[in-house]
Amino acid sequence: MEFPKLRPRRLRRKENIRRLVRETKLSLDDLIYPIFVRYGQNIVEEVPSMPGVYRYSLDKVVDAVKEVRDLGIPAIILFGIPEHKDEVGSDTWSDEGIIQRALRLIKKEVPDMYLITDVCFCEYTTHGHCGVLCDGDVHNDLTLENLKKQAISHAKNGADMLAPSGMMDGMVRAIREALDSSGFENIPIMAYSAKYASAFYGPFREIAESAPAFGDRRSYQMDPANSREAIKEILLDVQEGADIVMVKPALAYLDIIAKVKEHTLLPVCAYNVSGEYAMIKAGGKLGWIDEKRVMIETLLSIKRAGADMIITYFAKDVARLINSGEV
């Protein structure tokens, strides 16, 4: 028998050589942490389906952001749960809205944190859909008008970046033009460009109180069966002026992340969503998986597929491991 000429195991035998040849690495610079702000006082409220993730009242959110900052995570994305909802989600463009108040407070107390805001309506409307309803469906162009008001309000109150997530046709162009005409031409847009109508959003809808009161969101979010459509959506958002494009969810859509990376020179963000987080947490709690290793493997797979940054509820957990030298 001919002796093997190629022995790939030579580069796997010891940890130091594995480190030297490792192709994909996680760093703090990859991470964006979601934070949920709600009305009330003295509230730090854990949601059962998402262990370790909390809703914070305004008087508690600064401490939460400081913890993220001190771990070395460069950015957060803010989601709001308002006290009052209405048919159009008017809290989203009010200067006294939950996000606007949070932006002003965080900017004052933690000025070195980069603040991204989710720009949508589902948490703010009585019906739980992502825009203005007409005859039981979301009216695209009327929703664009409200998105412009929301975007300007967020920028005016301190947002560093806007992340429109409603999957309305033309939303990036509408927001870009609104920002530019209002003197906010330096505010970038991270578009939820390929956002699928996914079953993985369930825990998020609990924590954000954003489940639709009727029907579903399949008339505006993407069909999980489609991949070419994702490229179409990405290229449209690039054409309209997006600065970063996003794929959501991440773990079940690694092929989409890889295809998007091939089709654009813009940075690509992936959202490691609530259901992906909850499954790993549940499996770890039951002892069925090694939670820490599965967490790292999951985030590595997302980055390996092509993501330049990852929105993840694991951000604080992985940051602690990176800071301790375990990753």
Image (tube, rainbow, N blue to C red):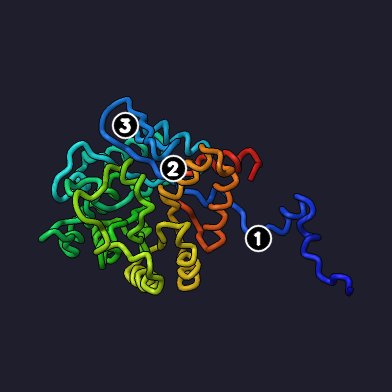
Q: Which residue is mark 2?
A: 113
Residue found at x 88% / y 74%: 2
Q: Is residue 308 left or right of residue 243?
A: right
Q: Amino acid at mark 3?
A: Ser
Q: Amino acid at mark 1?
A: Glu
Instruction: Give the mark nearest the N terminus, 3 or 1.
Output: 1
* Relative height, residue 245 to residue 117 (above, below): below
Residue nearer the viewer, 81 or 159 = 81
Q: Is residue 4 left or right of residue 50?
A: right
Q: Residues within 10 Å of mark 3 (few under 14, many from 20)?
A: many
Residue 187 rendering spot, x and y as whole percentages = 35, 56
Describe the element under mark 2 as helix, strand or loop. loop
Measured Cα–Cα span from mark 2 to mark 3 = 18 Å
Mark 1 near mark 2, Cβ–Cβ under 8 Å? no
Residue 239 rendering spot, x and y as whole percentages = 35, 72
Instruction: Tell me the number on the disc at residue 23.
Output: 1
Q: Is residue 297 left or right of residue 77?
A: right
Instruction: Give the mark nearest the N terminus, 1 or 2.
Output: 1
Instruction: Tell me the number on the disc at residue 57.
Output: 3
Q: Amino acid at mark 2?
A: Met
